[in-house]
């Protein structure tokens, strides 16, 4: 299987903390995941679980005075990115790892044209200019499905629709042929129909350009649609990981189970919709032991004091709940 | 209770604990504010200034004040600070307290320390009252513009308001008869339109059908245009003009400064109200049937108050500077009452011989105004919602 | 775009109309009936009241007064009470005197504020930022006249630079390099003084704008693309941060009259601010009222220019 190759990106025990006045917010508290080349992986979690911070730390974009990397490794093509300084990061940003952000309107500079913004990275990294740069931009716009690409080049962001702007962001990310694209909730700010189109675009591009995509989302429906493997994140830690089919078929962590149970599906029609009681903990005030235990229907005494390890269910399916693991053994 | 029920109860308790906020808003604000040392220094100096001004008021007023600012001693003029009085030439009543001229004397032999004390109260009052007036107007106008902004004024409203304003203006300039006539006309117009409106509604006609009910512009536009007009006038010059025309008195100065600086507060309040109005909690309150006034005062005002407070603090600083400037130019509080600007104005002729007459009040003004500015900026940073911790 | 300009012009004209009314009504601020001398107000002698009445046609109805007032003002017929010269002529002459002061001060302010503010924002929290912040607070809080005297004492005792007036008496007869140098010496201190307050305020504003823009998403995107810090700060951030300042540029026009009263008084500079002050001292009402009106007009023109420039510079408005 492909899993025997070396991963393109391997995050190991990453910890990112933010220093507040009185306390430390442990936004990312020991996260590990892998992305292999030419695969689409999803990172799923509610708002506040630390997925955006994880993404930002992959590119060294976490603001260091309040934040700091408190531990772990980020191995990209074998090199530890955490050893990089700012100028090293500049060489890979946009070039080998590119990012697509959530809000296309605010993420594009309102006073520069589309051509300018897409072409910038190409100029810096690939030293292409002039007419060939222009053609490259046109081809990129066509690849992401924007009609009349040549005319759109001279437009400003506010003249495009939300979906088009996000396509431009994707074009920007693709511009230097990166090996990995990190997409941080790229469809959350868009209409549902546009969402579907953008998802499809990601799928197509990933296959066509043979690149890897780390797709971050809170929407399980999206996960089911595009990812082969998925990591479920809660309160700064990975609580379950594995193939999408396995997890949707039989989730092995109470949090994932709760997420799946609260999806409105046809079968639950007419019944009261389930929601996980309680709310996501404050990153500065995480409970001891398992971070999910205050909300968990299966909690036992041990959960309150011991931080659980990942339990292996085989074939890449791991979950951080020994209680359910032991139940399954029995 | 069954095990599941017990678990559920325990879980509820845990969740409750996790949800209650750690600190109240006031505490949160204080924590942020405390970190800014300059702002704390500003606050401390402000408190000291306030105390000095109050002390000054008591110590220098009345028939036999503790420190007499008006006592003229021509034989002791232009003595440097901390110098001892020449007891042979002075009557007992003329001897300064503490047997020293703490800050020296001015060109008429008056004790500069006493005059500074007297002047501090003036500076304080002018600052606070002027800003009080401008903030009051600002909150009122800004609140109306922001909250009722979209209410359109109809032709009949406008006619009535214009007529009323004209009537009042005429009375003010002493043309009583025409003024009163116009006011009566306004009243008649008012009653007429109300009655006509009732009749129209009674007959089922739509509300906007009559000629007098044409929509002209909104309340918001009206108030903002008034702000625009006021902004057109250069403030210091306008204040100077008005103060020159009116009889000189401390009250006139305070009122004029207040009446010419409300524009900033109005804009702030309006901006806050405009954005707050769209927020869900206002819609929720309305849906619950909460009346408009209550919404404004209880729900929106606490949120909108922050930028007003900041601009008020900085406004006090600027009012003190303006008053000093006016005094310097000779249009401030009339003599013999002392103000800090006065002392500098009188002393500028002796700038090389008696520099303390310039430096002492100048540095005093600088320190006080600086403290207000620092405090205001500290307030702004601490109240800035963007800096609040995300919980 | 045309509609934007059109609407702006219409708005300005309406505002101008109301401004003219308010300007006009200031005469009536004079307390008491014009025919009555208020014994408590020493500013109104009977002769003054009579002159008042005649010049402003106070015995005629209000709207006629208004008409006369502006007819005289705009046609240059209004005459100064002090020396009987035409008000507009006087204003023009003094304006030309104020101009060099104003230009030098503005150039100083704008060229020094931006680098200071930008640098403070980029190196936020470091020594440079903290020192410039504190200096700014100091400069904003110091009373202008006090600072002027400190500078005067310092400069006169150390450098023997002439400070008073626009030129040294009699220098016009000397060779022109001398004249030029003399003018520059005289110009130096007042412009620096005028500029310092402006620099303090403007650089703070530049800094806060820059900080706000630096926190925006598109700056994060620029960084995520791997652009070098120069491009991130000076291309992406600065261009957006500068937008509001382009509009502010139009608003410096009104500054011609406003802040210079104190500076011109201290340095005996024969400019427009000082003329206004002297007019107030001498109760020269035609001048006072005209200057009020003229500065209001300047403000409106200034805001109009700002609107225009904003439109030129921000593609979101233009298109």
Image (tube, helix red, strand yellow):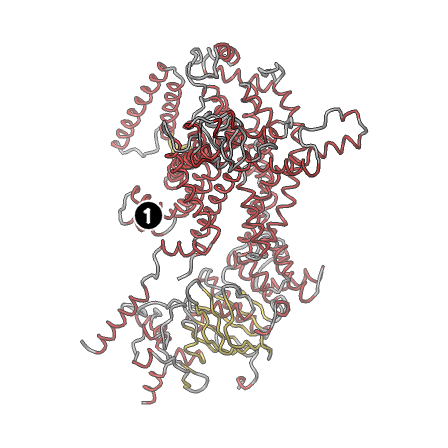
Q: Is mark 1 on a helix, strand or loop?
A: helix
Residue B11 appears left or right of B279: left
Left or right of residue A307, residue B74 in this image: right
Residue C184 or B110: which is nearer the viewer?
B110
The residue wearing badge 1 is B299
Question: Number of labelled discs?
Answer: 1
Q: Nearer the viewer, residue A1 or C120?
A: C120
Residue furthest to the right in view is C175
- Residue C114 percent across, percent down from the top left: 62, 48
Q: Can residue C10 be seen in this view?
A: no
In the picture shown, does residue C270 fall above or below B152? above
Residue B197 is left or right of residue B327, and the answer is: left
Percent position of residue C146, x then y: 56, 36
Front residue of A287 and A180: A287
Q: Is residue B348 above or below residue B285?
A: above
Label 1 crowd bin: few (<14), some (14–19), many (20+), radius 10 Å: some
Please name the residue shown 40% across and 21% down the image: B169
Q: In which quarter of the image is the N terminus of chain B?
A: bottom left
Q: Which residue lies furthest to the left in this view?
A: B1
Determine which quarter of the picture holds residue C35. Answer: top left
Left or right for B360, reference A278? right
């Amino acid at each position: 299987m492909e899993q025997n190759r070396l991963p393109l990106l391997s995050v190991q025990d990453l910890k990112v903390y933010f220093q507040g006045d009185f306390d430390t917010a442990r936004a990312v508290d020991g996260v590990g995941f892998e992305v292999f080349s030419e695969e689409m992986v999803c990172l799923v979690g509610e708002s506040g679980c630390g997925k955006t911070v994880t993404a930002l730390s992959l590119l060294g974009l976490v603001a260091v005075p309040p934040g700091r990397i408190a531990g772990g490794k980020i191995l990209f093509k074998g090199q530890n990115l955490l050893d990089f300084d700012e100028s090293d990061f500049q060489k890979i940003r946009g070039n080998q790892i590119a990012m697509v952000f959530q809000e296309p309107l605010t993420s594009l500079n309102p006073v520069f044209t589309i051509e300018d913004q897409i072409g910038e990275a190409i100029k810096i990294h690939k030293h292409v200019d002039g007419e060939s740069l222009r053609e490259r931009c046109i081809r990129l716009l066509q690849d992401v499905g924007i009609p009349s690409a040549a005319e759109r080049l001279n437009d400003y962001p506010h003249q495009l629709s939300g979906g088009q702007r996000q396509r431009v962001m994707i074009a920007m990310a693709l511009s230097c042929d990166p090996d990995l694209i990190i997409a941080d909730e790229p469809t959350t700010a868009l209409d549902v129909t546009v969402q579907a189109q953008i998802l499809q675009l990601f799928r197509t591009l990933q296959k066509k350009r043979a690149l890897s995509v780390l797709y971050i989302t809170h929407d399980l429906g999206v996960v089911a649609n595009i990812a082969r493997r998925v990591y479920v994140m809660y309160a700064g830690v990975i609580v379950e990981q594995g193939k999408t089919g396995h997890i949707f078929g039989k989730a092995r962590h109470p949090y994932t189970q709760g997420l799946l149970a609260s999806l409105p599906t046809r079968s639950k029609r007419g019944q009261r919709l389930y929601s996980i009681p309680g709310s996501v903990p404050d990153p500065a005030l995480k409970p001891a032991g398992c971070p999910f235990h205050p909300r968990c229907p299966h909690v036992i005494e041990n959960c309150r004091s011991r931080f659980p390890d990942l339990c292996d269910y085989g074939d890449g399916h791991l979950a951080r709940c020994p209680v359910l693991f032991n139940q399954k053994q029995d | 209770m069954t095990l599941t029920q017990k678990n559920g109860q325990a879980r509820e308790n845990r969740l409750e604990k996790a949800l209650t906020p750690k600190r109240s808003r006031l505490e949160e604000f204080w924590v942020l504010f405390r970190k800014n040392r300059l702002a704390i220094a500003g606050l401390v100096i402000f408190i000291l200034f306030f105390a000095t001004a109050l002390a000054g008021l008591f110590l220098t007023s009345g028939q036999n004040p503790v420190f007499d600012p008006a006592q003229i001693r021509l034989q002791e003029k232009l003595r440097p600070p901390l110098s001892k009085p020449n007891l042979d030439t002075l009557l007992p009543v003329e001897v300064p307290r503490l047997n020293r001229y703490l800050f020296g004397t001015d060109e008429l032999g008056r004790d500069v320390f006493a005059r500074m004390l007297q002047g501090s109260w003036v500076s304080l009052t002018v600052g606070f009252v002027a800003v009080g007036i401008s903030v009051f107007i600002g909150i009122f106008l800004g609140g109306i513009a922001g909250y009722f902004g979209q209410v359109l004024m109809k032709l009949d409203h406008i006619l009535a308001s214009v007529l009323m304003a004209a009537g009042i203006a005429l009375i003010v300039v002493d043309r009583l008869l025409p003024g009163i006539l116009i006011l009566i006309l306004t009243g008649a117009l008012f009653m007429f339109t109300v009655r006509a409106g009732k009749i129209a509604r009674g007959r089922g006609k739509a509300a906007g059908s009559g000629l007098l009910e044409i929509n002209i512009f909104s309340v918001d536009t009206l108030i903002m245009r008034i702000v625009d007009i006021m902004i057109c006038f250069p403030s210091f010059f306008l204040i100077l003009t008005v103060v020159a025309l009116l009889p000189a008195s401390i009250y006139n100065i305070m009122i004029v400064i207040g009446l010419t600086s409300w524009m900033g507060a109005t804009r702030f309040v309006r901006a806050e109200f405009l954005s707050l109005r769209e927020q869900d909690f206002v819609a929720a309150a309305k849906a619950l049937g909460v009346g408009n006034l209550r919404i404004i005062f209880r729900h929106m005002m606490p949120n909108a108050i922050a930028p007003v407070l900041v601009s008020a603090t900085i406004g006090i600083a600027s009012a003190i500077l303006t008053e000093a400037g006016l005094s310097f130019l000779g249009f401030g509080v009339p003599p013999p009452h002392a103000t800090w600007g006065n002392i500098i104005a009188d002393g500028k002729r002796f700038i090389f011989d008696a520099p303390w007459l310039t430096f002492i009040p100048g540095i005093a003004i600088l320190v006080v105004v600086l403290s207000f500015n620092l405090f205001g900026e500290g307030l702004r940073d601490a109240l800035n919602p963007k800096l609040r911790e995300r919980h | 775009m045309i509609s934007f300009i059109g609407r702006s012009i219409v708005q300005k004209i309406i505002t101008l109309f109301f401004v003219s009314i308010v300007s006009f009504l200031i005469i009536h601020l004079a307390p008491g009936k014009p025919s009555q001398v208020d014994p408590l107000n020493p500013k109104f002698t009977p002769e003054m009241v009579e002159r008042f009445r005649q010049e402003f046609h106070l015995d005629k109805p209000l709207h006629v007064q208004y008409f006369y007032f502006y007819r005289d003002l705009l046609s240059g017929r209004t005459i100064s009470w002090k020396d009987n010269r035409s008000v507009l002529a006087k204003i023009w002459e003094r304006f030309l005197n104020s101009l060099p002061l104003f230009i030098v001060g503005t150039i100083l302010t704008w060229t020094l504020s931006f680098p200071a503010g930008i640098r403070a924002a980029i190196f936020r929290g470091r020594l440079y930022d903290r020192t410039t912040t504190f200096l700014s607070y100091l400069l904003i809080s110091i009373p202008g006249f006090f600072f002027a005297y400190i500078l005067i004492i310092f400069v006169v005792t150390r450098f023997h630079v002439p400070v008073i007036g626009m030129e040294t008496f009699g220098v016009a007869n000397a060779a022109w390099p001398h004249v030029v140098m003399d003018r520059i010496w005289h110009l130096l201190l007042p412009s620096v003084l005028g500029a310092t307050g402006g620099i303090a305020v403007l650089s703070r504003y530049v800094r806060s704008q820059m900080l706000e823009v630096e926190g925006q998403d598109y700056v994060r995107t620029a960084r995520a693309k791997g652009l070098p810090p120069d491009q991130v700060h000076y291309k992406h951030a600065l261009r957006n941060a500068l937008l509001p300042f382009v509009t502010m540029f139009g608003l410096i026009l009104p500054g011609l009259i406003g802040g210079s009263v104190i500076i011109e008084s201290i340095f005996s500079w024969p400019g427009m601010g000082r003329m206004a002050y002297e007019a107030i001292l001498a109760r020269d009402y035609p001048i006072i009222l005209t200057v009020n009106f003229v500065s209001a007009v300047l403000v409106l023109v200034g805001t109009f220019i700002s609107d225009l420039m904003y439109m030129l510079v921000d593609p979101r408005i233009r298109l």
